[in-house]
Amino acid sequence: MDLPPEDDLIRLNKLLATLGVESRRHAEEMIIAGRITVDGVTATEKGQKVRRGAVIKVDGVEVGPPPPPAWLALHKPKGYVSTKEDTRDRPIVMDLLPPELSHVHSIGRLDGDVSGLLLFTNQGELTHRLAHPSYGVEKVYHAATRRRFSEDAARRLAHGVDLNDGPTAPAKCRVVGREGSGSLVELIIHEGRKHQVKRMFEAVGYPLAELRRVAVGPVSLGDLERGRWRHLTDAEVDELYRMAGLPQPSRE
């Protein structure tokens, strides 16, 4: 039997990431779990190479040719959850995107009661790296406190506070305005733990009234209206790939 030329072969985990199914690391976990078939045969090796035209199925569902790469910014309103489906029938962020963009997924999440900037793509490896704290992607939040925020609390957040899952890394914190009887505080972090920003403010005695994310890396919320989305600029995409340690992407 003639074997396909080496340049027609690609590692299965890389192909799955290219198709937007998962990052390479998660693709390897799916292979080990026996969830992937190649031309009808269950894949068993993480480093397995496959021909580019192979029929790939995930949990019995065929993965088609990759759609064009997409990179989006959404102004998520409060009340929407950052998932593709919700068993409790709550509004989901995908409802705010057109059907032709159903193949994208969010880079990280925002809690249902948090508004602001949420990024989307169909590039699995980029998603994994930008969401991983080791890449140190800067995230900027504006938090409204219920009472005046003190300089001491700002210093404590800047130095890092102890949470139940460990101390936080140093952050940048400053008061940028007033919000009713409280303050509007800007917090810049490079981590992404569950409910982290809320827990940080609670740790210094300031439960939040509102929380909004206004920037992720080079991408700012700007004047994007609530519930609206836009394509990222080429410059924003290039900078995200640089921060993730990935080569510049093809736009085709």
Image: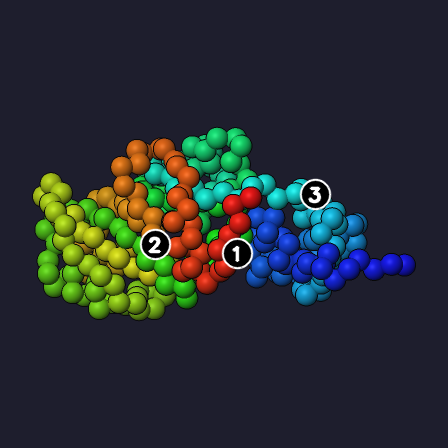
Return the residue at label 3. Answer: 62
Please rate how many residues cluster around mark 2, counting C-alpha atoms within 10 Å: few if below 14, some from 14 to 19, many from 20.
some
Locate residue 78, reporting x and y percent: 32, 38
Q: Taking 105 as reference, is 173 left or right? A: left
Name the residue located 22 percent from the left edge and 49 percent from the top edge. 143
Q: Residue at x 51, y 36 (%)?
A: 101
- Residue 217, disc: 2
* Element at label 3: strand
Percent x, y of residue 85: 51, 39
Q: Amino acid at mark 3?
A: Glu
Q: Nearer the viewer, residue 251 or 115?
A: 251
For the point 12% across and 63% down, the residue is 152
Secondary structure under the numbered disc 1 in the rendered image: helix
Mark pair 1, 3: CA separation:
20 Å
Labels 2 and 3 touching (C-beta < 8 A): no
Q: Which part of the image, by quadrant, shows the N terminus?
A: bottom right
Distance between mark 2 and mark 1 Cα atoms = 17 Å
Q: Decide if residue 202 is in sight here.
A: no
Q: Position of residue 148 (x, y in %)?
A: 10, 51
Mark closest to the chain's N terminus, 2 or 3: 3
Distance of mark 2 from mark 3, alpha carbons? 34 Å
Name the residue that disc number 1 marks. 125
Q: Which one is closest to the eye, mark 1 or mark 3?
A: 1
42 vs 103, left or right, is right
